[in-house]
Image (cartoon, helix red, strand yellow):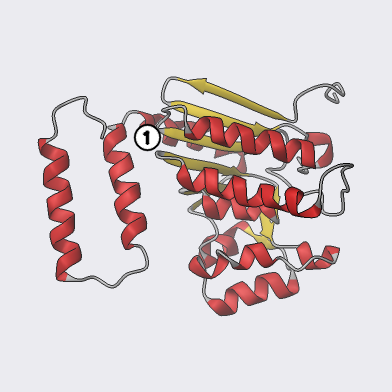
Amino acid sequence: MSAPPDASPVRAALAGPVARVVIDRPDDGNALTYAAMTAFVEALETARDSGASVLVIGGEGADLTVGRAKHERVPGVTRTENLSLILRANAALAAFPGVSVAVVRGRALGFGTGLALHSDLAIAADTAVLGFDELAHGLPPLVVLTYLYRHVTPKVADDLVLTGRRVGAAEALTLGLVSRVVAEPDLDAVVDRTVAELAGRDASALRLLKEFGRAHRNTQPTPEAGADAVARLVDWIERPQGATS
């Protein structure tokens, strides 16, 4: 059944330590129009500031999202304003202080593959399909290249953006586009179990792991880094219970 015209294109909910953001346009493959993208960004920013320790991002129906509505023109909105929503979404997701989990099912194209990469964990159904198809729509995905080289090798990145080819879940796992692949019928159960496990962890420990890991992700191991790790861990262990700073 189609959603009524005035229904929100994005659903957001907060239950204890878990925030959920769901793109709700299944009849259009959860394509992100300007209105939907605006709502999605606002939901991510709200989740970022909510105090939640886990953020789950998904799509209603068969797909995560087929990506942005690429040739939409919105009266009164410049192309710069429209495209800059991608930057706001990426920034809000990167700034989420806890663990973000993307639920990758069906098509996760363009911005959808970006969501998988920007999330801390991306759990995919074995039937999922990813890829950057912007060039096939006449748009060079320049924003993608600002982050893609950090996730995959340059040869893989160039292959993905220049050919726009679609990648099955198994290959996506091999390339590093997703964290884990499970049988499609098991996807929701695996996600729910993973989210419950994360939500049961010490929130400050999750934040520390994410912050420290990001700082050292692209650096070579050094004695200074090891000493920093020990100092930060000792500080966390000795911090009074309930302290969050």
| The C terminus - image quarter | top left
- Determine the secondary structure under disc 1: helix
193 lies above or below 181 = above
Could you say which quadrant of the image residue 208 lies in? top left
Going 16% across and 47% down the picture, which residue do you hit?
233
Lateral position of residue 103 relative to residue 79, left or right: left
60 lies above or below 85 = above
Residue type, numbered disc 1: Leu
**Residue 67 appears in the rendering:** no
202 lies above or below 128 = above
Going 13% across and 60% down the picture, which residue do you hit?
227
Going 75% across and 54% down the picture, which residue do you hit?
80
Badge 1 local density, few (<14 within 10 Å), some, or many (20+)?
Answer: some
> Measured from the top left, where is residue 185 in percent x and y?
61, 38
Could you say which quadrant of the image residue 105 lies in? top right
Going 48% across and 53% down the picture, which residue do you hit?
179
> Measured from the top left, where is residue 123 in percent x and y?
52, 46
**Residue 18 appears in the rendering:** yes
162 lies above or below 239 = below
Query: Badge 1 is on which residue?
Result: 198
